[in-house]
Amino acid sequence: VWYRFNAISNGVSVKLVSNFLDGAITLYSSNFTELSHEDVAGEGDPEILNYGSLVAGQDYYLAVSNYTPDGTDGPFTLCVQKLRAPLCAQATAPYTLCSSFK
């Protein structure tokens, strides 16, 4: 299943939850270049993809795939949330939390 979204910040967190799928999430740029892929083996395990190099205002695509061996489909929930760099990323001190997104 494909989804399109317009980035409103430079980071995104995508969470896929299903009790039926061995799901995977792949993030693509507007020209369908793969940017990131998340796939945890196991049916019913949540998938969480975090990516921090988006360009605000550009379109991106998400592909949700099912790797369940018998090919069984089922309902799933997909949540796309914006992420932004923490304020300490602008400070001069060597904060360890500044290398990640909140």
Image (cartoon, rainbow, N blue to C red):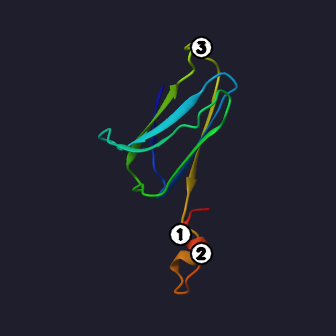
Tell me the quarter of the picture where residue 68 sits: top right
- Residue 89 drawn above or below residue 78: below
Q: Residue at x 57, y 13 (%)?
A: 70
How far apart are the alpha carbons under marks 2 and 3?
43 Å
> What residue do we see at 61% from left, 71% from top?
97
From mark 1 to mark 2, how far is it between C-alphas? 6 Å
Image coordinates of residue 28 in percent, x first then y, are 39, 41
- Image spot of residue 61 (x, y percent): 42, 38
Q: Position of residue 72 (x, y in %)?
A: 59, 14
Q: Residues within 10 Å of mark 1 (few under 14, many from 20)?
A: few
Q: Is residue 58 above or below residue 52?
A: above
Q: Is residue 82 left or right of residue 20?
A: left
Residue 96, label in figure: 2
Q: Which residue is mark 3?
A: 72
Q: Badge 2: how crowded within 10 Å, few (<14), some, or many (20+)?
A: few
Amino acid type, residue under disc 3 in the picture: Thr
User: Quick check: 79 above or below 70?
Assistant: below
Tag 2: amino acid: Thr
Q: Which mark is residue 99?
A: 1
Say whether marks 1 and 2 touch (CB < 8 Å): yes
Label 1 secondary element: helix
Label 2 vs 3, first from the N-terminus: 3
Q: Nearer the viewer, residue 24 or 102?
A: 24
